[in-house]
Image: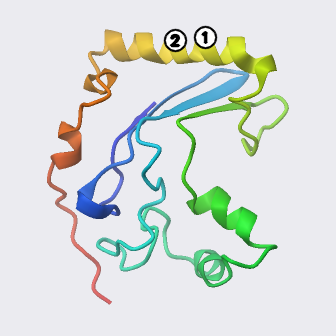
Amino acid sequence: MERERHADVRRDHLGYPVRAIRTRDFLYLHNLRPERWPAGDPDVFFIHGRPYGDVDTTHVKDYLLAHQHEPTIAPYFARIFGRRLAEELYDLRRDPHQLTNIADQPAYATTLAQLRARVKIWMSETHDPRLDPKYNAWDHFPYFGKATTQ
């Protein structure tokens, strides 16, 4: 799986590049720019006129935004809108909803290394320019969507 940009929802029109692989038992994601907000910046309103523009506006999103600092809501808010680590690994047998990132657990180090290698090999075979950590040309392509006016 590849992802670059879904909508124009980050400062300077940046994307959120990800490369991933899903097997029968695991999901591995390599977030290539983990310093960015995957759901869109909290303060860039270009495309949807709302924060975190990669998440469609719904009553649930409005509720989470309004109550994001409440202790009972904060974990859900972080799961949906928070930044991600550079690598994520999910055991689909034990965690079919992919809620617990196990990339840092020693018991999964071999699986993590194998899936990371498979993604890198695939990126190499497909001549993915994101193999170069400094590659940023795709971050400068124009976005042709129209901004929402509210």
**Closer to us: 13 or 92:** 13
Q: Quadrant of the C terminus?
A: bottom left
Provide residue 98's location: percent of width, then percent of height: 72, 41
Q: Quadrant of residue 88?
A: top right
Q: Secondary structure at mark 1?
A: helix
Q: Which residue is mark 2?
A: 117
The tag on residue 15 is none
Of 144 and 13, nearer the camera is 13
Specify the farthest residue to the bottom: 150
What residue is rendered at 39% in x and 74% in y?
Answer: 43
Crowd rating for badge 2 (residues with CA inside 10 Å; few <14, some 14–19, many 20+): few
90 left or right of 94? left
Say which element carries label 2: helix
Within-10-Å neighbours for mark 1: few <14, some 14–19, many 20+:
few
In the displayed structure image, the side of residue 60 where residue 147 appears, left or right: left
Residue 116, placed above or below residue 4:
above
Instruction: Name the kind of residue labelled 2 in the image.
Output: Ala
Q: Residue at x 81, y 73 (%)?
A: 72
Which of these two is toward me, 64 or 105?
105
Asked which quadrant contains residue 103, the reply is top right
Q: CA distance from mark 2 to mark 1?
A: 5 Å
- Identify which residue is drawn at 57% across, 41% down: 85
Left or right of residue 146, residue 68 in this image? right
Q: Residue at x 17, y 60 (%)?
A: 144
The kind of residue on which mark 1 rests is Gln
Residue receiving disc 1: 114
Asked whether the beta carbons under mark 2 and mark 1 sit within 8 Å of each other, the answer is yes
Instruction: Name the image quarter holding residue 92.
Output: top right
The answer to whether 105 is drawn above or below residue 42 in the figure is above
